[in-house]
Image (cartoon, rainbow, N blue to C red):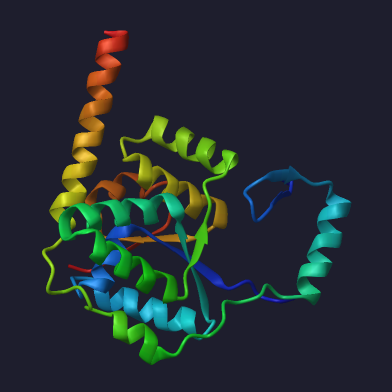
């Protein structure tokens, strides 16, 4: 069995002994994770398509990523040949 | 035993599909509605949120970026900080796959949460053997 790990809300990873893991499982089972406060469907639907009149960002996003990768390649070539 | 809710990580492609009612937007809306009812959990990396903000600001103007950020915050999505552990997890992924830095954070968060990554971004297809993907329909 892989070592159980606890990832804290701030992203820290803590390796756990099997005994501690079992204790934590018991606590979690007794207290299910808090779910976000329910939102009204109407609030969520109000944001659907709200920005449809603006130009698509798809090409800007893909272009940004292509440019980022190209910059990295160029930097690597400059430093490491 | 209490059942943990299924978690999905949204990237900026998914968020913009919702806000612009683009292809796949209805799938994202459906996920948001389910998250609103507490049936599933939705997550985003704040690095990805930052990317949405600067792209929107550059392309549509700062005022639109502020409004969109306010709208994003009203949605039932949990935002995750870039901690040292997450930065390094993203770095390991980026070293292995030719993806953008922001997408590396999205992928690392999906791995950390054992979540499915929701996207229509063709560049993320490179990660499909590493992370479960929910592909937004064309």
Image position of B105 (left or right of B65): right
Image position of B27 (left or right of B95): left
Q: Is residue B119 above or below residue A3?
A: below
- Going by the picture, which residue comes out furthest to the front? B63
Q: Residue at x 56, y 51 (%)?
A: B112
Q: Residue at x 31, y 56 (%)?
A: B53
Q: Nearer the viewer, residue A10 or B60?
A: B60
x, y percent for residue A34:
66, 75
x, y percent for residue B2:
71, 76
Q: Residue at x 31, y 9 (%)?
A: A80
Q: Quadrant of the N terminus of chain B?
A: bottom right
Q: Nearer the viewer, residue B43 or A26?
A: B43
Q: Nearer the viewer, residue A9 or B68?
A: B68
Q: Is residue A1 above or below residue A57?
A: above
Q: Residue at x 26, y 8 (%)?
A: A81
x, y percent for residue B106:
42, 51
Q: Quadrant of the C terminus of chain B?
A: bottom left
Q: Nearer the viewer, residue B93 or B57?
A: B57
């Amino acid at each position: 069995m892989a070592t159980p790990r606890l990832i804290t809300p701030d992203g820290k990873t803590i390796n756990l002994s099997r005994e501690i893991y079992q204790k934590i499982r018991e606590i979690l089972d007794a207290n299910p994770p808090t779910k976000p406060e329910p939102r009204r469907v109407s609030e969520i639907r109000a944001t659907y398509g709200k920005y449809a009149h603006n130009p698509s960002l798809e090409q800007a996003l893909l272009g940004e990523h292509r440019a980022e990768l190209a910059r990295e390649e160029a930097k690597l070539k400059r430093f490491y040949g | 035993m209490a059942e943990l809710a299924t978690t999905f990580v949204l990237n900026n492609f998914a968020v913009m599909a919702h806000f612009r009612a683009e292809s796949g937007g209805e799938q994202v809306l459906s996920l948001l509605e389910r998250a609103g009812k507490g049936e599933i959990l939705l997550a985003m990396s704040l690095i990805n949120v930052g990317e949405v903000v600067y792209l929107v600001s550059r392309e549509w103007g700062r005022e639109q970026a502020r409004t969109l950020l306010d709208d994003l915050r009203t949605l039932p999505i949990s935002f995750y900080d870039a901690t040292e552990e997450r930065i390094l997890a993203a770095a390991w992924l980026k070293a292995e796959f030719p993806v953008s830095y922001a997408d590396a954070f999205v992928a690392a968060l999906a791995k950390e949460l054992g979540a499915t990554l929701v996207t229509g971004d063709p560049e993320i297809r490179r990660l499909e053997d590493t992370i479960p993907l929910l592909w937004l329909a064309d």
